[in-house]
Image (spheres, coloured by chain):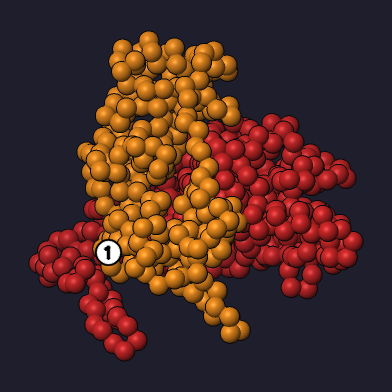
Chain colours: A red, B orange
Amino acid sequence: MTTSNYATERETTEGRVFTVTGGDWDQIVSGTDPINDERIVVNMGPQHPSTHGVLRLILELEGETVREARSVIGYLHTGIEKNLEYRNWVQGTTFVTRMDYLAPLFNETAYSLAVEKLLGITDDITERATTIRVLMMELNRIASHLVWVATTAMELGAINMMLYGFREREYILDIFESVTGLRMNHAYVRPGGVAQDVPDEAIVKIHRFLKMMPKRLKEYEDLLSGQPIWIERTTNVAVLDATGCLALGVTGPVLRSAGLAWDLRKTMPYCGYETYEFDVPTHTDGDVWGRYLVRLAEIRESLKLVEQAVDRLKPGPVMVADRKIAWPAQLAIGVDGMGNSLEHVAKIMGQSMESLIHHFKLVTEGFRVPPGQVYVGIESPRGELGVHAVSDGGTRPYRVHYREPSFVNLQALPAMSEGGLIADVIAGGASLDPVMGGCDR
Amino acid sequence: MSAASDKPNTGGLPVPVTPAGASSGAPAEHPPASPAGQGMFGIHGSGDVSGFGGLVRPRQPVEETPRPYGGYFDEVRDALEEAYPAFGDAIEKVVVDRGELTLHVRPERIVEVCQVLRDDLALRFELCSSVSGVDYLGADERRLHVVYQLTSMTYRRRVRLEAAVSAEDPHLPSVTSVYPTADWQEREAYDMFGIVFDGHPNLTRILMPDDWEGHPQRKDYPLGGVPVEYKGAEIPPPDRRRSYQ
C-alpha cells in the first residue's frame, strides 16, 4: 500500500515509519451534517471503559435512540491459532490459556480434551485428574461470573458492587495461585491430566471459600436485586428471545435467560458432569435482568459442584500412566512459580541417563498425535467453547480453531441494541459478557 | 529449495522467498521453517548430508467409512438421504472417525445440505456451532477446507460438514441465509484463509486490519516475528528456530 487512508509512510534512518491516523473516521463524519441532520454517528471505543476491553461500537443515533449499531473487533488479535501450529501439543496449553483470560481453565480443558480425543486416551484420564479439572473449572466459572456482576454493576452505576465482586474473585485467584502457581494464564490443565496435584493448603482455602460465599452472594442480592435503579436499568432491556439466540448462535447464560435450558454439562456431558448433582438455572424474559439472575444462580450451582468435587478427591495419579505422553518431570511450585522439582532434576542428571534422554525427547520434540480431526465443546461461563483440532500425525497441531462464545455472542449486539436507548447499549453489551481476549484470539 | 543457490548460506535456516499473497508491510517474509510433514530438525536446502531434511511423512488420504457406522450416524445419513434427493450428487464421502461423523459436501451444494439438515424434522440441526477453515497444503488439490460443526439441540447430536475448494478458485456459497450466526465466522475464514463466501452480506476482514495483505492462516504464509536479543545472544523468531519433529 503506497497511498493509504489509514497510515502515511515515510523512510527514516530507522526504517519505514507509519503515521497512523483516525482511519476512515473523517469520511464517515463528513457524510453527516451535525447541525441539521437528525442522525449522528458516535464512535464508542475501542478505548471506552464500558465496552469491556478493546471493543469498538459505531452507533447511529437519532437523539438518544440507537438506529444502527455495528461492532468492530480485532483490536486484540494476537494470532494464537497460528502460533499454536509452531509449538508442540503440550506447549499449546500455554497459548490457549491466554485467549479468554477470565476463563483460562476452560480454554485449557477444552484444548486438552480435544488432544486426548485425538490421541484416543479419553478413557485413560485418571479419576483424580478429571475431578480436579471439574473443581478448577467451577471455581473459575464463579470467578468469571463475579467479574461479570462486578463490572456490569459498575457500568450501571453501582461502584461498590464492583469492589465486592473483585474482592471475592481475588480469593479464588489465591486458590488458583496455591494450586497452579499463577493467578491467571495457568497452563495447568494439560493433555493427559493436570500439571500437578492439588496441595492440602488449597483444599483448606476452598473449604473456607465454600463457607464464606453463600453469605456474600446474599449480600450481592440485598445490594442489587431490590435496588430500583438496577431493576430499571435491566428489566426489559436488550431483549433477545430463544429464536433470536439460536439464529445468532448465542449460547450460555444469555440463551438460558431466554428460557432454553441448554447447558453442555447436562446435554452433552464431559468430564463426568453427568454424575454430579446440579441444576441449570433459567429465566424466561431474555433481558439483562434475567441474565443477572441466571448468572447469580449459576454461582450457587457451581458452589454445589465445587463441594461435590472436593468430597470426591481420592488420592491417585493426576496424569495418564503412558510415559510416552505424560510430562516426564515432577513439577513443584517454587518461589517464582511452577517448575521442575529439584528431586526430579537430581534424578535425571545424577542417576538415570535414560530418564534424561526420555525427558529431552518428550520436551523438545513432544509426542505424536495420530492424523485426524475432532471437535470438542464445553460449557464455558459465556457459552459453548468449542475446539476444532486437526492433526497431520506430527508433534505439533496442524490446525486448532477455537469456537469462542465471546466472538459468536457479540454478533447479537446490534439485534439487542437497535431501537433502544444509547444507555442500554452498555447494559446489553455487558450482559453478553464478551471478553475480547477470547473474541479476537 | 531451488532458490538456495543465489542466496547467502543461512546455515540451514529457511531461505527467504516471498510467499503468495504477501508482498509488503507484512512480517518477516520467509516460508515456514518446516512445512508440516517434511524433514526433521528444521533442515532444508543446506549442506545437510544426514538425509533428515529429505524425509517426507506420507499423508494418508481420508477414506470413506463403510456402513454401519454405529451410534446415531446411520440414522442421520438415512434421514438426510430420504429428505434430500440429491444426496448422491452432493455428498462426496461420509467419514466416521473418533466417534464423530463428517460429511464431505460438494461446495456448491453446501447451502442446500445445511437447509435440509436444519429443517427436516428427523434431523433438526438448529445450531451452527462453528465455521472455520483448514489449509491442507500439499495434501489435497482443493486445499482449502471449510469445516462446519452443526448441533442438533433436539436430538443432542453433532455432525461436521466439510467442503473443499482450491486456492485458485476459493468460492462457495455462504450459509448465512440458513444460519445467520455464520456471518462473523465466515468473515474470519475469509480473513484468515481467503475463502470467498458468495452471497455473504458483508464479507470483509474481521480480525486483521482492513488493509492487510495476504491471508495469515494459510500454510504458505509465514508466522513472522523478529529476533530477540537476550544477554548478548540472539534468539531467532519461532518459525526460524531449529525444530524437532
- What percent of the width, then of the height, locates residue B98? 58, 29
In the image, A278 versus B194, the foreground residue is B194
Snapshot quadrant of residue A129? top right
Residue under the image location 28 percent in, 67 percent down: B24
Q: How many marks?
A: 1
In the image, A137 versus A359, the foreground residue is A359
> Does residue A27 appear left or right of residue A146 in this picture?
left
- Residue type marked 1: Ser
Snapshot quadrant of residue B41? bottom right
Snapshot quadrant of residue A10? bottom left
- What percent of the width, then of the height, locates residue A320? 76, 43
Q: Is residue A181 visible?
A: yes
Count residues near mark 1 (Cα–Cα under 10 Å), then give few for <14, some for 14-19, many for 20+.
Answer: few
Residue under the image location 79 percent in, 59 percent down: A356
> Does residue A63 appear left or right of residue B39 in this picture?
left
Residue under the image location 32 percent in, 21 percent down: B90
Q: Outermost residue toward the bottom? A: A13
> Does residue B91 appear left or right of residue A372 in this picture?
left
Q: Outermost residue toward the top? A: B82
Quarter of the rendering occupied by the N terminus of chain A: bottom left
In the structure shown, which secondary structural element does the residue marked by tag 1 occupy? loop
Residue topped by disc 1: B23
- What percent of the width, then of the height, locates residue B155? 51, 22
